[in-house]
């Protein structure tokens, strides 16, 4: 393997963990899953008229004929492939023996019972009687509940942040000269090279916003920023401030001992798990449209509400209270706004991972009934084209028995989202959020499931490529754990 590179399957673009198949003639490399599918369905009869690929969309094998001095394009034949692995077999055997020995020693331990926990999400205050709760205490609570695959909210994370770093003016002054691609939330379309200063000018002022062809102010979003640069390098002061205050550090930090992604060796091309900024205008006046449509993250994630803009709804407090009541959120959240005067930033709907297929069926049937054509290699959740409004939530409950966690994210709230959990967001005010991904032992199984789902998406799909390398993460995490356990 080359340093700082990822070995990808030449067909599905999923990371190759270890064993894979390579064509003897041209070096075409595929993962075991792609090879197994092709071998099972192989036929030399090819009616495909694609110039460079067969009917399975595999590129033809190019063989050089020294006599004619030409390259002949032929089918890839399964028995012309050889099995190759990066890790020597004796290493795998030794690791597996050690792993099974430890697993046998703990197999009689009491298994976790999800029924012990409330079906509602957990809210924890990071301050108790104006005293900051230690991260160790927060982590203990987190570990107790994270197995249940329910969201967790930790309040008041903003109390120790340097808020001068996180205001719209501070971002505008530092980065307003840039032109960046934004997203039009109504159309789910890209607005190319928009002025970042103009974006910030309209953050809390409707009159300063870009407008559409109907002269309506655009609802814009800056997503996954910085897109290519490392947050730590581009925004060093903000990164340091964030890392000092981000809760559950053993899980959420890049080097956290329970963040399995930290187990990847330095010579790997490490996945970019953030943090990233998510900055968007309010969608309070568009109840059927989300700021972020329904989707699934490939790993566990934490999302921190770091700044909430001025309330631009027409009726101010009365209108906001109406929105909160219509959202069907619980009384505790209503009272945070109504009695405590906290500032609501966003409305979240989070579903359990095991209900994703039911939601997928509902959306597929609904789209067919609306006359939409269902294309191959698409997915109603992974395509991020659907926002589930109140009427649809009722239909999901009545027809599919799908429950939802309705969460109002207030200023300073950190929401923890389990891997594999479908979720969507609608901003109730203009918000600045920062989010980071991490991989937990409790969530790694769902990471594998989502990775395999992404394999089936089209090559052009934004989620198709395996950016997480979950199999590499699992292998090196186990290796690291065993090395510690076996240490004299």
Image (cartoon, rainbow, N blue to C red):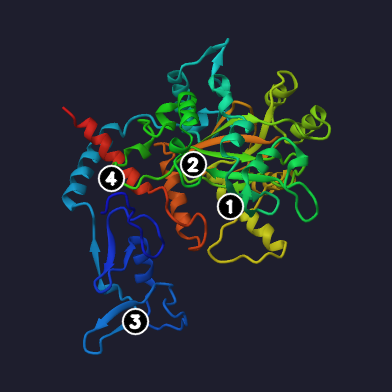
Relative depth, front residue between 398 and 78: 78
Residue 266's place in the image compared with 78, above or below, is above
Give whichever of discs 2 and 4 has the lower sequence position: 4
**Number of the front mark, 1 or 4:** 4
- Report if residue 124 is visible in the image: no
Q: CA distance from mark 2 to mark 3?
A: 43 Å
Quadrant assignment for the N terminus: bottom left
Q: Secondary structure at mark 4?
A: loop
Q: CA distance from mark 1 to mark 3?
A: 38 Å
Q: Is residue 184 above or below residue 256?
A: below
Under circle 3, the secondary element is strand
Which residue in the structure is indicated by mark 1?
Answer: 381
Q: Quadrant of residue 365?
A: bottom right
Find disc 3 in the rendering and name its residue.
Answer: 73
- Counting residues from the start of the chain, the first of labels 1 and 4 encountered is 4
The residue carrying mark 2 is 419
Tell me if 418 is positioned left or right of 195 in this view. left
Label 3 neighbour load within 10 Å: few <14, some 14-19, many 20+: some
* Nearest to N terminus: mark 4 or mark 3: 3
Q: Which residue is mark 4?
A: 267
In this view, the residue in front, 292 or 215, is: 215
Q: Residues within 10 Å of mark 1 (few under 14, many from 20)?
A: many
Distance of label 2 from label 1 (alpha carbons): 14 Å
Indicate which disc, 2 or 1, sits on the residue closer to the N terminus. 1
Mark 2, mark 3: which one is toward the viewer? 3
Report if residue 165 is visible in the image.
yes
Image point (46%, 39%), residue name: 274
Q: Residue at the location (27% across, 57% down)?
A: 19
Mark 2 nearby-residue class (10 Å; few <14, some 14–19, many ≥20): many
């Amino acid at each position: 393997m080359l340093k700082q590179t990822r070995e990808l399957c030449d067909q599905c673009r999923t990371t190759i963990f270890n064993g894979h198949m390579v064509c003897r003639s041209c070096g075409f490399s595929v993962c075991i899953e792609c090879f197994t599918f092709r071998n099972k369905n192989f036929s030399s009869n090819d009616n495909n008229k694609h110039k460079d690929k067969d009917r399975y969309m595999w590129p033809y094998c190019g063989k050089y004929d020294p006599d004619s001095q030409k390259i002949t394009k032929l089918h890839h034949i399964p028995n012309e492939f050889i099995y190759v692995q990066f890790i020597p077999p004796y290493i795998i055997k030794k690791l597996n023996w050690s792993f099974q020995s430890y697993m046998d020693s703990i197999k009689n331990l009491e298994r976790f019972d999800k029924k012990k926990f409330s079906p509602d999400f957990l809210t924890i205050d990071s301050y108790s009687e104006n005293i900051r709760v230690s991260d160790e205490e927060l982590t203990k609570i987190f570990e107790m509940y994270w197995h249940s695959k329910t969201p967790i909210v930790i309040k008041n994370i903003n109390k120790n942040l340097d808020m001068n770093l996180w205001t719209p003016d501070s971002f505008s002054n530092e980065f307003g000269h840039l032109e960046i691609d934004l997203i039009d939330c109504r159309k789910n379309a890209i607005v190319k090279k928009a002025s970042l200063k103009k974006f910030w000018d309209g953050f809390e002022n409707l009159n300063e916003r870009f407008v559409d062809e109907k002269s309506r102010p655009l609802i814009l979003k800056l997503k996954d920023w910085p897109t290519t640069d490392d947050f730590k390098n581009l925004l060093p002061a903000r990164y340091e401030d964030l890392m000092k205050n981000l809760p559950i550090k053993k899980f959420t930090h890049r080097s956290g001992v329970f963040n399995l992604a930290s187990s990847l060796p330095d010579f790997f091309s490490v996945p970019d798990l953030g943090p990233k900024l998510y900055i968007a205008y309010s969608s309070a006046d568009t109840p059927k449209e989300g700021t972020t449509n329904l989707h699934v993250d490939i790993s566990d994630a934490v999302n921190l509400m770091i700044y909430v803009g001025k309330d631009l709804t027409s009726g101010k407090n009365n209108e906001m209270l109406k929105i909160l009541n219509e959202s069907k959120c619980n009384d505790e959240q209503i009272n945070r706004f109504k009695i405590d005067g906290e500032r609501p930033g966003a409305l979240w709907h989070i579903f359990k991972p095991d209900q994703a297929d039911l939601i997928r069926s509902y959306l597929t049937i609904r789209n067919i009934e609306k006359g939409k054509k269902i294309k191959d290699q698409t997915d109603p959740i992974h395509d991020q084209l659907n926002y589930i409004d109140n009427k649809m939530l009722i239909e999901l409950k009545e027809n599919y028995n799908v429950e939802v966690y309705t969460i109002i994210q207030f200023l300073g709230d950190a929401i923890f989202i389990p891997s594999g959990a479908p979720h969507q967001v609608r901003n109730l005010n203009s918000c600045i959020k920062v989010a980071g991904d991490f991989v937990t032992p409790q969530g790694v199984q769902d990471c594998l499931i989502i990775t395999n789902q992404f394999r089936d998406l089209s090559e052009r799909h934004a989620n198709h490529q395996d950016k997480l390398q979950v199999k590499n993460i699992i292998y090196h995490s186990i290796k690291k754990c065993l090395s510690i356990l076996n240490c004299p």
